[in-house]
Image: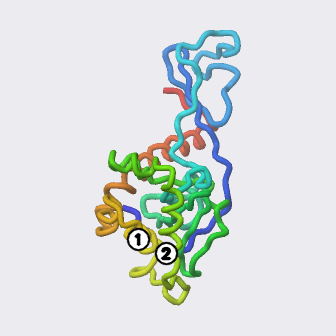
């Protein structure tokens, strides 16, 4: 499984949409826009009925700013769609109640790079355990989240304290989860392995399938007929 480490980089990227429709018994995938004609039978798509209306394949990648009070993940270098492989390192961070990203790497704590998180995976805290849904739905949850984040930041997260193996971005997030002092967050923070297996691995597996489809489309000039 990919390791979690520091030093994110890369430019923001506009997320392309993968579209899908069915015609003449075939499924057709395209990037960003639909073809004027069916690539299988050359029928003008504007003048025919489609068995399945065109729809966008749900993307696992989100803008961090749209998901306050969350844990977010992206490649340390580059973006998921263009650069990610199974051997890529991942960078993990936290969003506050406004959606601003707070992260830790070898340069220390950063609070001004939210725009770089325009193509990230959002860890679904409420999805992991049903009891969390009621907790995060509380009107005061955002205020409590920010308070615990502020307490976490009171610790020494300077560049001098950074260690690629022992005190990295992952350590920062687990420390924050411990500071929440709520079950199941403290349990998640007690084991890096179980945290990855329960919360991160399902997201990266889903992302891998989407990336594979996207890159296949790129190789076939934006069209795939199945």
Q: Could you tell me which residue is drawn at 57 percent across and 58 percent down?
A: 97
Q: Secondary structure at mark 1?
A: helix
N-terminal of the pair, mark 1 or mark 2, is 2
Task: Give left or right: position of 56 versus 90.
Answer: right
Q: Are the residues flagged by discs 1 and 2 in contact, CB closer than 8 Å?
A: yes
In the rendered image, which residue does mark 1 sit on? 179
Task: Give left or right: position of 139 versus 199.
Answer: right
- Exactly how many numbered labels are in the figure? 2
Task: Give left or right: position of 46 versus 28.
Answer: right
Image quarter of residue 214? top right
Q: Looking at the picture, does residue 32 appear above or below residue 7?
A: above
Q: Looking at the picture, does residue 65 appear above or below residue 158?
A: above
Q: Could you tell me which residue is drawn at 59 percent across and 62 percent down?
A: 78
**Residue 167, how many percent across, how many down?**
43, 80
Q: Judge the density around disc 1: few (<14), some (14-19), many (≥20) Cα neighbours within 10 Å.
A: some
Quadrant of the image for the N terminus?
A: bottom left
Closer to the camera in the image, 156 or 180: 180
**Residue 135, how many percent across, how many down?**
40, 51
**Residue 149, how many percent across, how many down?**
51, 69
In the rendered image, which residue does mark 2 sit on? 151
Q: Looking at the picture, does residue 27 appear above or below residue 223?
A: above
Q: Could you tell me which residue is drawn at 43 percent across and 50 percent down?
A: 124
Q: CA distance from mark 1 to mark 2?
A: 8 Å
**Residue 10, how many percent across, how many down?**
64, 64
Q: Judge the density around disc 2: few (<14), some (14-19), many (≥20) Cα neighbours within 10 Å.
A: few
Give the numbered dot on residue 52: none
Closer to the camera in the image, 189 or 226: 189
Closer to the camera in the image, 122 or 17: 122
Q: Residue furthest front?
A: 140
């Amino acid at each position: 499984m990919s390791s979690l480490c520091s030093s994110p980089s890369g430019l923001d990227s506009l997320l392309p949409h993968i579209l899908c429709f069915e015609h003449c018994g075939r499924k057709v995938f395209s990037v960003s826009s639909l073809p004027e004609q069916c690539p299988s039978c050359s029928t003008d798509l504007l003048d025919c009925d489609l068995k399945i209306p065109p729809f966008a394949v749900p993307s696992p990648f989100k803008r961090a700013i749209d998901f306050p009070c969350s844990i977010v993940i992206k490649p340390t270098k580059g973006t998921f769609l263009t650069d990610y492989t199974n051997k890529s390192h991942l960078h993990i961070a936290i969003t506050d109640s406004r959606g601003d990203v707070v992260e830790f790497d070898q340069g220390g704590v950063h609070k001004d790079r939210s725009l770089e998180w325009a193509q990230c995976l959002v860890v679904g805290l409420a999805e992991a355990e049903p009891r969390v849904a009621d907790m995060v739905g509380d009107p005061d949850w955002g205020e409590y989240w920010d308070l615990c984040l502020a307490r976490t930041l009171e610790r020494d997260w300077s560049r001098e304290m950074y260690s690629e193996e022992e005190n990295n971005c992952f350590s920062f997030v687990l420390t924050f989860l411990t500071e929440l002092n709520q079950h199941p967050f403290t349990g998640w923070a007690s084991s890096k392995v179980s945290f990855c297996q329960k919360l991160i691995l399902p997201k990266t597996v889903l992302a891998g399938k989407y990336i594979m489809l996207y890159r296949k489309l790129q190789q076939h000039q934006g069209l795939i007929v199945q």
